[in-house]
Amino acid sequence: MRHPAVRTALLLALLLLGAPLALQAQVDEQLVRSYLWPQTPGEFGPAEAGLRAAPWTTGASREVLQALEQIMRVGPPVAFDIMQIVGDRLNQFVVSTPGGRRVPVLVRLPSSYERDRQYPLMFAMHGGPPGSVEGAMGSAARMIDVWAPAAEAAGWIVASPAMIDVVAGDGRTQERLPYEIFQPEEARAVLHAVRERYNVDLDRVVSTGISLGSNFSIAYAAAHPDWFSAIVPVSTEGESREHLLRNLVPVPVYVLEGTQDQNIRGVSGPRALNNILTALGNDLVYREFGDRAHEGFAEYYPEVLRWLEGRARVMDPLQVLRVPHAGIAATSRRVHWVESRDRQGVVRARVVSRAEIEITARWTGVVRLHLNDRLVDLDQAITVRVNDQAVFEGVLERSVLKALEGARALKDELRVYPVVLEVEVPATPASMEVAAALTEELEPEHPAGTLSFWEMYAVRALEERFGSVGFSGTAVPMPTEPTAPEQVAIRITAVDGRSDAATAGLLAGDILLRFGGEPFFRDRGGVAGLYHWLVRELRTHGQEYELLVWREGRSVTLRGDFSLGPYRPPTG
């Protein structure tokens, strides 16, 4: 548990905030902690039941939420097993990630480390793909070593995952390099595991990497801009897709690049990253060295850490933009406090005042807002407008349960939202006109460059393993009343009898309305767009998807498992 002195300081902070000590007593700290961080398998159920029965969890006041946040900010109890130590302040453990992969992780603590203080974390990913498991382990150790001097002086924790599943497979050619992606959910699992063992400041978690690791950093931060306080790509291939980079704008970026780098397609990639982020107003440092190649820049890391000192994670920006893109790590449906029901949704949300929120949205039928008193004044009526039409006006009730459920799902107790408001996107012609204007405004001004080596090879490897969705079809009008004027359905023209789709029961002549809950939209790719989504979303282990079809005048729900298959190198 955290030191009692920390709790004393937090109670004092409550007084300074104007929250009386009586409220602190009213919020049952042990119940909250048992719900968020149960220490035994049987602890969670009674805690959840106790919270649902407690009178202070619904209709909560601003002061009760302040008291709750102070309890949550103390964080979970921190474990530290002395048997994990493998060297001078170097620790090693293995993380089980979603899908069953086991990732070795190396962690180096600063000599100043104390269990009762919070420390910033540098999440450092090595390059690759490595040629062997031993190569991955060695590369992770080198990432620890290269950051160690600067991190020791500045008081940072450094963690490096050994990406042993990102090992190049057999059959490498100029056109083919089969290797696995270190998926965002795996990186997240490693971050959670580090946080469970050491006292990490969640508002100061920085992702860095060299070469392939730097590209992962860019991809993760663009997909989940609320994860990191900053990223530091080193010897990166960069990124030239504006739609992808628009999601990265809230995240500060520090780039170190050598002009003589021969391990990337060319310096035009990182320069495009610089030019686009600069035009978008990102908090950016771009340093390019004419005499350097594909390498680390360790002598500049002390300067990087000084730059990072004043840059905490952006928690609740008053404007949020979610843009889907063609990158291999898809934009999260939820970005900060805004959530698109549909993966294709383009959403811009803006807090106009303490009582008004303005949303522009296209290609999604529903937008969810996760709100707190930092964004709006929950003691007064709130107005929400979507595509210039009022869709909600009223007083929203704070719920301690919603705040705790959300923080537990995110595994991030600093993201506290006691209100979740779901609003529909109006289906009127005027609404669609406003939505279309947004997507036209977001059209890229800079042409996207050639796909970088890392993503080109990764996509080809995925396409080997998932040849097709298993059916063909054409877009047709919705046979039922559409939920949006742009929505269409897919009439199935043929089904591969050996496919997962056939096993699920899909038949030629069916009209596919939704796949995995996702609708289809006019001019958004149809079957080809579905394939593009699935080839990036699927994993080796099967996942169940619902297929909603229109068959013989009624809707029918089919279910089937879809997964990546084995590598199938091209023949001939």
Image (cartoon, helix red, strand yellow):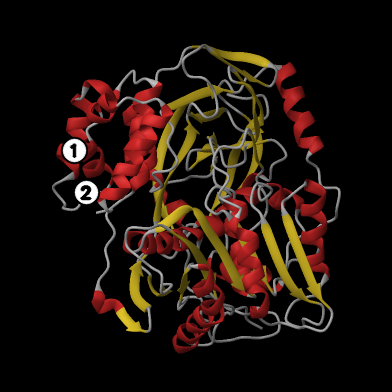
Mark 1 crowd level (few <14, some 14–19, many ≥20, 10 Å Cα): some
In the image shown, does 550 or 25 lie closer to the viewer? Answer: 25
Considering only order in the chain, which callout, 2 or 1, is on the residue closer to the N terminus? 2
Mark 2 crowd level (few <14, some 14–19, many ≥20, 10 Å Cα): some
The residue wearing badge 2 is 38
Question: Is any atom of residue 405 visible in this view?
Answer: no
Which residue is located at x 36 percent, y 30 percent?
Answer: 15
* Coordinates of residue 568 in the picture (x, y in percent): 54, 76
Q: Secondary structure at mark 1?
A: helix
Q: Is residue 473 left or right of residue 440?
A: left
Compared to residue 36, the image places residue 267 above or below, namely below
In the image shown, does 446 or 554 lie closer to the viewer? Answer: 446
Quadrant of res 28: top left
Q: Is residue 402 left or right of residue 256?
A: left
Which residue is located at x 44 percent, y 55 percent?
Answer: 201
Q: CA gap, disc 1 to disc 2?
A: 9 Å
Q: Are marks 1 and 2 in contact (CB under 8 Å)?
A: yes
Q: Amino acid at mark 2?
A: Pro
The residue wearing badge 1 is 47
* Coordinates of residue 185 in the picture (x, y in percent): 46, 58
Which residue is located at x 16 percent, y 46 percent?
Answer: 43
Q: Is residue 519 left or right of residue 516?
A: right
Q: Amino acid at mark 1?
A: Ala
Question: Is any atom of residue 92 visible in this view?
Answer: yes
